[in-house]
Image (spheres, rainbow, N blue to C red):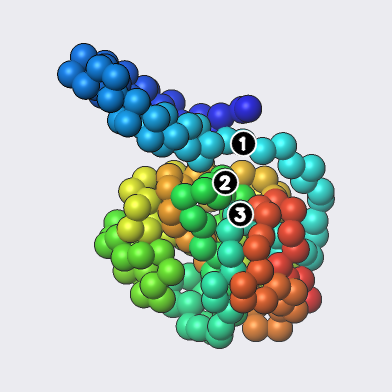
Amino acid sequence: MKLHKESTGTIVVATILFAVIAFAAIYFLEMWSLLIIVPLLVIYGLVFWFFRVPKRNILDHKENVIAPVDGKVVMIKEVEEDEFLKEKAIQVSIFMSPLNVHICRYPVTGKVVYKKYHPGKYLVAWHEKSSTENERTTVAVQAYNDHKVVFRQIAGYVARRIVFYCNEGDQAKAGHEFGFIKFGSRMDVFLPLNTEITCKIGDKTKGGIDVIAKLK
């Protein structure tokens, strides 16, 4: 299983903690140490599972809007996007549990025209205000037919580290990686009002594969 490059520090810390606690349990609890070691081993294994990099056959897309993450569609609504677009847009929000792959992918193909990091709170990721009050990043891409599509990584109650690798002027390719969020979190995509939405609330998405909308 291939692991993401963001896993290194977390796995080193997890390995040290596991080794120290397991040694202490064996030393002090002897035969009862398995009561501590077995649950710890499960948690340790979940850390590796969280940072897995699945093999995905990423196709070329022009007008399609691709699911940027693995997760569940929790919101589709018309909102005012007042950071970059300064106008009404359709917001599609996808929630990621700690068990989902947390690689963040470009939802559309085009040119990166805006990026910004915002420090903030750590409300639970499905909270509606997390989009504007939590720690987050905002990226905008000029896409098909010159539509500007905005997408936002949002830290949740558990997620405390967001990374994004893109810069203004970069070429974005739908389905390809641009960042990573550690542990539970959310991604919002803001689309033009005339966009054809092809997903619905409750849908499970596979990042880089599933089409969630079509630009016109």
Q: Which residue is rendered at x = 70% and y = 60% of the image?
A: 66
Mark 1 crowd level (few <14, some 14–19, many ≥20, 10 Å Cα): some
- The image quadrant where one finds the N terminus is top right
* Residue 126 visible: yes
In percent of width and height, residue 197 lies at 71, 77
- The residue carrying mark 3 is 70
Tell me the residue that label 2 is attached to. 101
Question: Residue drawn 27% across and 62% down?
Answer: 121
Q: Is residue 19 left or right of residue 97?
A: left
Residue 186 or residue 152, whichever sits in front: 186
Which badge, 1 or 2, is on the more N-terminal residue? Answer: 1
| Amino acid found under the numbered disc labelled 2 | Val
In the displayed structure, 134 sits above or below 97; it is: below
| Cβ atoms under marks 1 and 2 closer than 8 Å | yes
Which residue in the protein does label 1 denote?
53
The reply to whether dot 2 and dot 3 touch (C-beta < 8 Å) is: yes
Which structural element holds mark 3? loop
Numbered disc 1: secondary structure: loop
How far separated are the C-alphas under marks 2 and 3?
Answer: 6 Å
The percent position of residue 180, horizontal first and vertical second, equals 50, 44
Residue type, numbered disc 1: Val
Which of 72 and 69 lies nearest the eye of the viewer?
A: 72
Q: Position of residue 155 (x, y in %)?
A: 39, 56
For label 2, the crowd category at 10 Å Cα-Cα, with few meaning under 14, some 14 to 19 and many 20 or more, is many
Sort mark 3 into few (<14), some (14-19) or many (20+) by Cα contacts within 10 Å. Answer: many
Q: CA distance from mark 1 to mark 2?
A: 7 Å
Mark 2: secondary structure: loop
The amino acid marked with disc number 3 is Asp
At x 61%, y 44%, the residue is 177
Residue 203: x %, y % from top left:
66, 69
Q: Reading the chain from its start, which is encountered first: label 1 or label 3?
A: 1
Q: Is residue 122 above or below residue 57?
A: below
